[in-house]
Image (cartoon, rainbow, N blue to C red):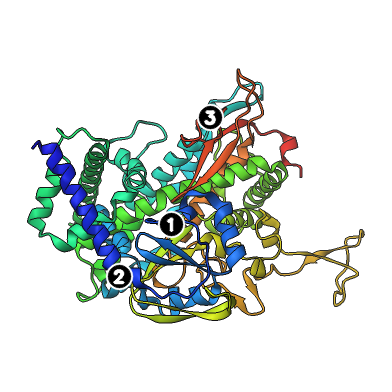
Amino acid sequence: MSSQVLVTSGIGFLSLLALWKTFCGSSRKSNLDLDGPKEGHWLIGNVRKIFECGLDYSVKLAEQYGGAVKLTSLYGDVVYLSDPLALYHVTIKDQHDFEEPDVFITNNKMIFGDGLIATTGEQHRKQRRLLNPVFSTSNLRELLPTLQPIAHRLTSIVVSKLPDDGSYREIDVLSLLSRSALDGVCQAILGYPSNTLDAEDDKYTEALRNISPMISKLLYFRPIVPLVMRNFSSYWIRKLVNLITAPWIPTELMKDLREMRRITEVMDSGSKKAFAEKKAALETAATPPPTDVQPEVDGLKSGRRKDVMDIMMKANSASSSSEQLTDAELLGQMNVMVFAGLDTTTSALSRCIYLLAKNPLAQARLRSEIRDAIKSAQEGSSFSEHDNPLLHLSYDALINLPFLDAIVRETLRLYPSLPHMGRKVLKATTLPLQFPVRSSSGAEISSIAVDENVFIVISILVANRNQTIWGDDANEWKPERWLPSPVTKDEPGTDVPSDGVGVLSSKLPAPILGVKDGIKYPGVYSNMMTFLGGSRSCIGFKFAEMEMKQIIAALVLRLHFVLPTDPDANGHIKEIVWQLKAFHTPVVKPPAGDGVSPAVPLKFRLVQEEDFKW
């Protein structure tokens, strides 16, 4: 028997063993009394449809069945959850009874090490205690100057591709946005001197850019990993990995596994090198310098900007021995932060730019807001296209631009970068519901009993579109919903001088969105679930928000952009559509595109004075 047949048979055996474990597991015997769609594959159920059938399917599912829906899967019954009270119990009140599934934790641990997304229990809580202060507002203020040149360089590259006569040129901006996000996380998070906007990737940045696509390609292979980890010793695991990634096995799956192993090893090697350099620098800084040597500033080499790893490692060294993280844990944070901040930020940025191209009045309004803020920051100064006027905009000014903030929040509400997150029930419990749903018999129920090992899919996407909370226009992109409302003279209770045309110069305070009749979602970001809530919420969301705002502001200030309008040789106009699987992925719809390759082609030109009018 050939080695290839042996390997294929071995993988088949592991798959069958996984199936046996699944079918014999308690999750298959769940007594979940909840309504949901009955159609689905006899073996794998119907849960995959929320990942494969797009945004509309997910939203309509909740509209038909409510905030708790019964789905089926290879692993047994699944609760598709978007009810605010139930999510409060899952993510905050009883969060320790709902943990990420083994497949999530184990795979992340193998790829990234002991970072936040690969740890549970007290280890996870200890890591959070150290890391929460790292992303404080004062630290973010010091990180913004690292992002500003990256945003300016991105804009300059686009400008350099445009005709001098002010006409449009089509540019696929997705790769540039991805490289900007990569440079942002490498330089501001790791302190790694990447420059992918201007040069080709080195091995490390190439690995970082390719890790997420490879994870997506191997999505259906992931359930085997926990099974192997639980049932084989480390010796046999190494033997198995060496065997199935051997170069003489030509199957496509084996090629993908070999590539995943290569990417992981490159990423691990690069992170260890960067970590060792930082650790050595920190230890050197802790040693008193000779009297004739200029001391370092705040533990950092003079002239070098601070990054998140500097802050984290310094905080760790200042902690008590019982609270300190190991080197392996610190290294794991490096890998996790880059992974978590790259594709999610790229996805959100791409959607914002696309929506602004689709809504030219919103684009003009934002452009005017940014220019006015710059003029206020540097009264009487002028700027050219070769200047970086946004350098004059402080962190506080950037973050508090009302319409920019509204655009980012509204986009993240409607299109969260991670639409769904999984949880596994650790012990049988009852989840109360804010809004009643139907049982499997059609009776109205206000709580659902969930057995141990049942899986829960938290629908961030659906929670953020709950019409009871957000209104009848919850599925519409309306940044204005986040802004203060104008007050007219005729409104009762107002006594403010008007501007002469019946509209008062003052405005009502901005509404508290996502809250209605005291009902709210337990998210950490504006009552939305975009970055979840509780101890497993996204720890770096404020950094992501800052990075997005800086890049959007830089692009909008100097460039005007619209959707493609020019037909190709066959008369087809490019139409960008967004596929929803694990992430939101933009592609060009056939026949103008292949419908597979990620792309955001837009028409750009230099800003003209008329582009500030709205």
67 and 557: which is toward the camera: 67
- Kindly report the distance in space between the C-alpha atoms of the residues bearing marks 2 and 3: 44 Å
What amino acid type should be assigned to the residue bearing mark 1? Glu
Residue 176 against residue 282 in the figure, above or below:
above
Earlier in the chain: of badge 2 and badge 3, it is 2
Q: Which mark is residue 142?
A: 1
SS class, disc 3: loop
Residue 156 at x, y percent in the picture? 52, 33
Residue underneath mark 3: 593
Residue underneath mark 2: 124
What amino acid type should be assigned to the residue bearing mark 2? His
Earlier in the chain: of badge 1 and badge 2, it is 2
- Mark 2 neighbour density, 10 Å: few (under 14) some (14–19) many (20 or more): some
SS class, disc 1: helix
- Mark 1 neighbour density, 10 Å: few (under 14) some (14–19) many (20 or more): some
Residue 101 is at least partly visible in this image: yes
Residue lying at 29% horizontally and 35% vertically, measured from the top left: 202
Which quadrant of the figure has residue 168? top right
Q: Which mark is residue 224?
A: none
Q: Given this view, does label 1 or label 3 mark the residue nearer the observer?
A: 3
Residue 124 against residue 189 in the figure, above or below:
below
Residue 53 against residue 541 in the figure, above or below:
above
